[in-house]
Amino acid sequence: MSLQKKRPNVPDPELLEKLFRTAFKIRVFETEGIKLYRQGLIRGYFHPYLGQEGIATGVCAALREGDYIASTHRGHGHCIAWGADVKRMVAELLQKETGYCRGYGGSMHIADIHNGNLGANGIVGAGTPLGVGAALAAQIKGSDAVTVTFSTDGASNNGTFLESLNLAAIWNLAFVLVIENNRYAVSTRIEESTRDADLYKRGLSIGVESHQVDGNDPLAVYELTKEAVRKCREGKGPILIEAKTFRHMGHHVNDPGKYMPADELAYYKERDPVDRARNALTEMSGIEQSKIEAIEDEIRKEFEDAVEFSKASREITMAEFEEFAADY
Amino acid sequence: MYRDALREALDEEMQRDPTVFIIGEGIAERGGSYKVTEGLLAKYGPHRVRDTPIAEAGMIGVGVGAAIAGARPVVEILYVDFAMLGMDMLVNQAAKFRLMTGGDGRVPFVMRTQGGTGGGVAAQHSQSLEALFYHIPGLKVVMPSVPADAKGLLKYALRQSDPVMFLEHKHLYMTKGLVPDGEHVIEFGKADIKRPGKDVTIIAWSNMIPRALEAAAKLAEEGIDAEVLDPRTLVPLDKAAILASVAKTNRVVIVQEAVRRGGVASDIASIIQEEAFYHLDAPIEIVAGLNVPVPFNLELEKASIPQLPNIIAAVRRSLHLKSDATAAQ
């Protein structure tokens, strides 16, 4: 430990452990969540974050309390990385009253407004203006909070991308736009959607500092975001980060993803973000294997407990719903 | 004047609450196309009074996001027609957020805009689109007809917690009316009887109120005592006031500038027939715009929205009187 502290390029072991814990927790949540879906316990839509864990993990580790995030339809990973209570997340997916949205929202709408999570979003591209709005609110209130919107390659072709990033730029807002470029907008390959698949260049065209990073490397994502967040707090925002990544399966749980070539998938699976978080922890902190196994067991147990908690929870009653609806 | 009343409301609320801010096209230095925000930049500075690029989806969305994060934005959209560019943000974001978060998240967002015909401004700058917003649960719809209501309702809009479509009318900005001194706040969902009467209830809002009052004055000359009821807010709608008036007069004429098809008037008529059917002595009359885009030609524009004779004729029909207008044709 003491030796490592003398080497400036070796990250803090606590950070490495945190990154691994987050990435692994997302992996467990999605893998086990899909099982619950197949059992019929989860209804509606479920867009797994499998394969993209490195981005939410790295970005959220660079934020602090008081900051804001806005997410996408593929939002479970962002919530978990933001520190959401897995119990309340599972309860929401199981449409229970103890869920984050009391069962009114579901997978695509988990939000925790009291803790800076502006929510997932069922409309591709909508999180960007909402995030810019939160950054504007922070500026007007004189707060140094930073807002991150997780967006997608698909959303980059939506009008809101230019309209709202441009507003953030002219008003110098503390806003970081993270484009998770997983190369597919549902099933449409990025080469069919744009002439230039390097989406960070779009930020440059409107005077926004823009970067590209390997989204499957949680540590690299963390370091770049930390720098971006620091600049934003100094009034040098907004900043765009394009994180290259890949989905491990189709668009949602019932999409086999046959349009994704096997060799492309294999390439990215070899660069699996959870494995890389684990390897970074092992190689750079010298942690014992048994400790890693203990962490993994603890996270699996947390999910199992969340399922039990959710199963035991009640649903919203008709009387409660009628009272709620009457206010509309 | 109507526009001064709106400015007073903004000014007073900005003074009261430092999180109130205004964004829109040409609203800062220029003071807005209808001069509503004139002087506010000098008083509150460029942080709270900001011009935007021409990007309606962006500015509405940013306003909604700021509201979710606890500020109180007023987004001014030059014409309600242009709000169509931001419909996702209004319909899928602002209106849905409260329910989707199980009641935790609120969106204290105000979109100020104006609609209606304006004397040859043609099809893309003349619409009355309140029915689109009325149809979406989660949006409040406010349509003030007089300066006092404009002020009181805008002040209330900036104190409540839901997205508000504050729909002004381009013909009303220069109209005059008394505004009470001191703190003047009007809660949503409270209709106002603009003229009491006993023979027939004319329900109207926005720019159709002055026209309905003019009709009532003409009708009074021949001994017909019309009550003119202004709901002021279409969502929430003051059903109780409407039903009470119908119970008193037993006859209803609903006047809207918007096109007839799928309009708010039709919905109000359905509420009345459902809840006050046995009070009615005549079929409910609806006087509305034609189901057609508003033409540029001034005579055609006039023909496409309710005029004084149309309202008078409808009242006469409702009273089973021979209509002068019909006889004249």
Image (cartoon, rainbow, N blue to C red):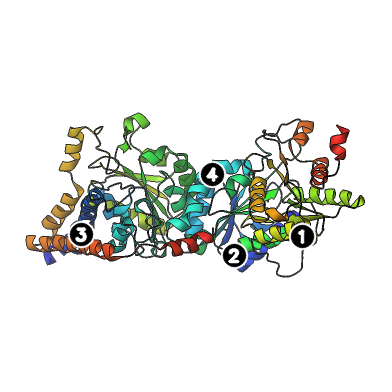
Which residue of the protein is positioned furthest toward the bottom in this rendering? B182
Q: Nearer the viewer, residue A224 or B250?
A: B250
Whether tag 2 and tag 4 are in contact, CB under 8 A, the answer is: no
| Chain letter for mark 4 | B
Q: Which mark is residue B248?
A: 1
What chain is tagged by disc 1? B
Residue depicted at 80% across the width and 61% down the height: B178
Disc 2 chain ID: B
Choose mark 1 or mark 4, whichever is in front: 1
In the rendered structure, find residue B86 and report the number of the disc placed on it: 4
The answer to which of B275 and B221 lies nearer the viewer is B275
Q: Residues within 10 Å of mark 3 (few under 14, many from 20)?
A: many
Give the residue at x 31% y 55%: A93
Which quadrant of the structure image shows residue B127?
top right
Q: What kind of residue is marked 4?
A: Gly
Q: Earlier in the sequence, mark 2 or mark 1?
A: 2
